[in-house]
Amino acid sequence: MNPTIRRTTVSLLILLIGLLLNQAPSFAGELISWSSDEGISRLEKARVKSDFFALSPHFEGQSNKVFCGVASMAIVANALRVDRDATEIPLDSSRISKQEMRFFPKGDWSPLFHRYTQESILTGQGKTRMQIMGEPYGADSEGDYGMKLADLDALATSLKLQTQTTYVNEELLAKQSYTQVVKQHLIDALSNNEQFVIINYSRKPLNQRGDGHFSPLAAYHAASDSFLIMDVSNTFQTWVWVESKQLMQAMARIDKQNSRGFIVISEDS
C-alpha cells in the first residue's frame, strides 16, 4: 500500500474510533446515584418505576449490619399490606416500654401502628433472630450471621406471602438468551403493581464496600439498561442505578454453596 494512503487510512480509523468513544456515555459501567442529575433524569424517563413510589413511603434503613434482608422484607411487606384500616399486622409492643405506656389513655386505643418493624417481622419460623445474629444451628457449629436467599424466602413464606425465587447462574451469564430471560423476569415483576423484587447480591462486582447484601429493586431505565437499587445500608451507601450486566454478575456470586439471585414477592392468592 502506498505510504501516503496507509497514513491517511490510519488517521481516518483513529478519528472514527475517537468519534465513537466520544459518543459513549461517560457514565457507562459506573454506578449512578439516584439523586444526581443523571439519576434523576433516569427516574423521570423510566417507564418501569411504579415500585419506586410504592416502596418509598415504607423505606427504612437496616437497624444493624446484618439486618439487610430483614429490613428489605419489612419494606416490601408493609408496601403490600399497610392500609389505613388494616389491623391484621400485629403491633410491635417492643417499641414502647411498659413504663411509657402508663401515660397513654386506657382502653382499646394504642400509640402503635399496624405495620411491620424489623423486630416484629421475624416470626420465629425459619432462621431466628439469634441465628441471624450468628448463633450456631444445625450442622453449622460456627454459626452463619445474616441471611441467605433461601432464608429470606422462608421468612416471606412464614408471613403467608407468595414467592418466586431465582438463583442466577454464573456459567450461563455468557449466553445472551439466559441473561435476557433473567432481565425480563425482573422487568415483568417491576411492571406488576402487585409484585415486588428483593435482590441478593455481592457488592464486590459493583466496586462497593462489603460483600453479600439484600435490597429492594425499584425501577428499570431502558435507555441505559439499568436498574435502581434502594440500598437499605443508607448510612454509607446511597440508592444507585446499576447496569443490568453488572447486576447479573453481582447476583451470580456464590454465597457458600449456592449463587445469589432475587425473590419476587406478592400476596398469596
Image (spheres, grey):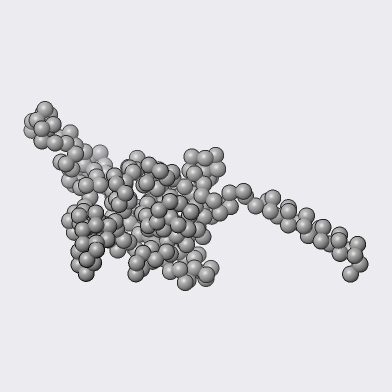
Residue at image point 29% right, 56% down: 146
Quarter of the image where the N terminus is located: bottom right
Q: Is residue 16 left or right of residue 87?
A: right
13 and 40: which is toward the camera: 13
Residue 152 visible from this viewpoint = no
Residue 47 coordinates in the image, percent (x, y): 50, 49
Residue 138 visible from this viewpoint = yes
Residue at image point 24% right, 57% down: 134
232 and 52: which is toward the camera: 232
| Extreme residue in the front direction | 142
Residue at image point 17% right, 56% down: 124
Residue 268 coordinates in the image, percent (x, y): 26, 58
122 and 253: which is toward the camera: 253
Residue 60 coordinates in the image, percent (x, y): 33, 42
6 above or below 96? below
Q: Is residue 220 left or right of residue 103?
A: right
- Give the total of numbered labels: 0
Q: Is residue 104 left or right of residue 22?
A: left
Quarter of the image where the C terminus is located: bottom left
Q: Is residue 180 left or right of residue 25?
A: left
Residue 132 coordinates in the image, percent (x, y): 25, 56
Residue at image point 37% right, 57% down: 212
